[in-house]
Amino acid sequence: MSAAAHPDPAAGVATERTDRRVELTLGALASFILVLIAGMIVFVFAKAWPSFAHNGLAWFGAGGNVDSQLGEIFNSPANPAAYQYTLHAWPLLYATLLTTGGAVLLGMTFALLSAVFIVEFAPAGLARALQPVVRLLAAVPSVIYGLIGILVIVPFVGNELIHQGRRKSVAYVVQLSGTSLLVAVLILTVMITPIMIAIIVDALRTVPRGWTEGAAALGVNRWRVMWTITVRAARPAIVAAAVLATARALGEAIMLSMVSGSVGFAPNPLDGLTFLFEPVRPLAATIVDNAEGLSVKPFGQTIYAFAAILLVSSFFLSFAGWAAKQPLKRYAGRA
Amino acid sequence: MEAATGALEPGGPAPLPAALPHGASAWRRRDRLGLVACWAAGLLLCVLAVSIVVFMLVKGIQYLSPDLLFSHPVSDTDQSKTGGFLDPLIGTFILTTVGTGLAVPIGVATAVWLTEYGRPAWLARAVESGIEIVAGTPSIVLAIFGLLLFSNGLFDFLSFTAQGGAVFGRSFLTAGAMMSLIALPLVFGTTREALQSIPAHLREASYALGKTKATTIRRVLLPMSRPGIATGAALGMGRIAGDTAIVVILLGATLQLQGVGNAPVLGTLRGTGSTLTSYVYNNSPAGEGNAPEKAYAAAFVLLLIVIGLNFAVDLITGRRRSRSAWSR
């Protein structure tokens, strides 16, 4: 106590040194995360490199059956000189784009409308009741969504929605069993929507009341006020919600491996409605499905190449979200 | 402008059309369509939520029995002999504890450093974006990165080593380490929010009493941000309990807990096992077990755990926030 009141020089130096040590320790712990990210990039890319190097840009192209290519890589001879690497991963990339894109587009529309409903039009009691429900839906583990999907939705689609004629029409390329692009996109949408609703509702509520009241005083109706002022002011948060949801959809592995059909097939839009019932297998689901083969060297390297693509996509996504928010910032109220 | 005239069209001599919910009949058709779409979306949300919750509740009550909770799982082709999911349940608790135990110190330290020190500025910015990047990285990528990292000879003390000297890389410790990365951004976010909401005059009062920065952090700031830290930990626990990809790849997915060596606690931690999520996955038609009843029962227990954690978050934050926040 007396030392604090009349700091003698020696004690001052000692506490300063402790302080400095605390700062350095905390700083080191914080920087640990950067080391980890650097390690992740280096490790994954170093491991994945042979797969990219052997295929060049053809890696990203279409050609042949991706599942039989993976099979050949898995069964390649033990001699390192004879390792197989040939892979044209387009069907997997395409499936990832389709499921993620479809779910984010559907989910965004649904989330925006629901959020506007909750903030502006829902009866107060209903809005209050929906809050814990939305939070719960956002917290439900993906494996539970997958379980409901594979035990309820997939059999329903397989038995009720796919008729024999449709099955026969594509039987020479792929079998339709119910596990399909449609189910994958629908369940993914249900999975990513709650988090978007939560973020958008919070943002809509922070828009300054003066702005909306000003518009209402001019005689603008509630829908227009909502759409032209509140939603517009909340755009940075909407972008943030979309980025977060895309990241989730992109990285979802377990649920998609359960309901998407796990066939490396590229659905053909020319098939009309049948397109929706064709099976797919996105990148993340491919990694889970083939985790057993990681110890086979060339196969493991191929799987790490998929992980590298996911890693780059999620980096790019974070950056795109940040960049998209910059010009929108001036619309942000005090939030 | 266009909107203003729209609201005051034919039958609308209403004095305050914007304020009246039933004034919608005077709106333009496009606005009315939008309103209908909003209601449709909102009601669809309610229907979805209710049907998911009721469905899981019905299935859970239908299939869950006490002996499922208290018997060990056994591998058998006859479904009546495969036992319950005691081991996965314990596995979930172990993994959540390990993951949260690692995430909380690192997350809190990072948040404290960033808000209280944050020097040099470029490093602070880098750490901030680093956390965001970790939050955006798919757990499946974290999982196979972990496998790569921990199969390294350097980390052989974390998992068991096979006869030939190959490090297995799969254990509660390695899976927990990667799980902590899932919880880390949540702990970091809530802790930082709590620290930032502490008024500056409290810090200044402590400095004025001659306390050092380190003492201020330990005695004033950390106790005050305890609810924030607890919220982050509970949210992180929920995320860890619900993740499947890391468990399937990094925990070895053996049905029972298989310890390494004779050390009682450390052996289990270094050993492999399963959690409720991997149990559900393996017992669904997508896995090897294919016992939907047991998968439903385990999923129900998992859901109860997640709901419980959510409830804990509400309890912690409920007293402080007058207006509830939707997103966490």
Image (tube, rainbow, N blue to C red):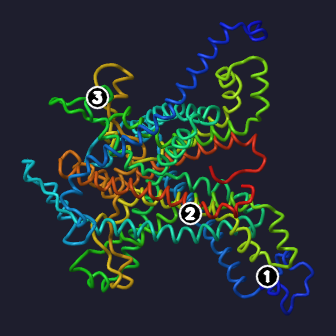
**Residue sitting nearer the eye, A207 or B276:** A207
**Residue sitting nearer the eye, B190 or B264:** B190
* Displayed quadrant of residue A76: bottom left
Q: Amino acid at mark 3?
A: Leu
Disc 2 from disc 1: Cα separation: 35 Å
* Displayed quadrant of residue A159: bottom left
B303 vs B221, left or right, is left
Residue that badge 2 annotates: A324
Q: For the residues tagged 2 and 3, is the chain the same?
A: no
Report in which chain the residue with disc 3 lies.
B
Q: Earlier in the sequence, mark 1 or mark 3?
A: 1
**Residue A165 pos. (x, y %):** 30, 86
Disc 2 from disc 3: Cα separation: 42 Å
Residue that badge 1 annotates: B24
Report in which chain the residue with disc 1 lies.
B
Report in which chain the residue with disc 2 lies.
A
What is the residue that sits farthest to the front in this orientation? A9
**Residue B298 pos. (x, y %):** 44, 47
A330 vs A302, left or right, is right
**Residue sitting nearer the eye, B15 or B260:** B15
Q: Amino acid at mark 1?
A: Ala
Labels 1 & 3 near each other (Cβ < 8 A): no
Q: Residue at x 75, y 22 (%)?
A: B207
Quadrant in which the C terminus of chain A is drawn? bottom right
Q: Residue at x 59, y 40 (%)?
A: B232
**Circle 1: element type:** helix
**Circle 3: element type:** helix
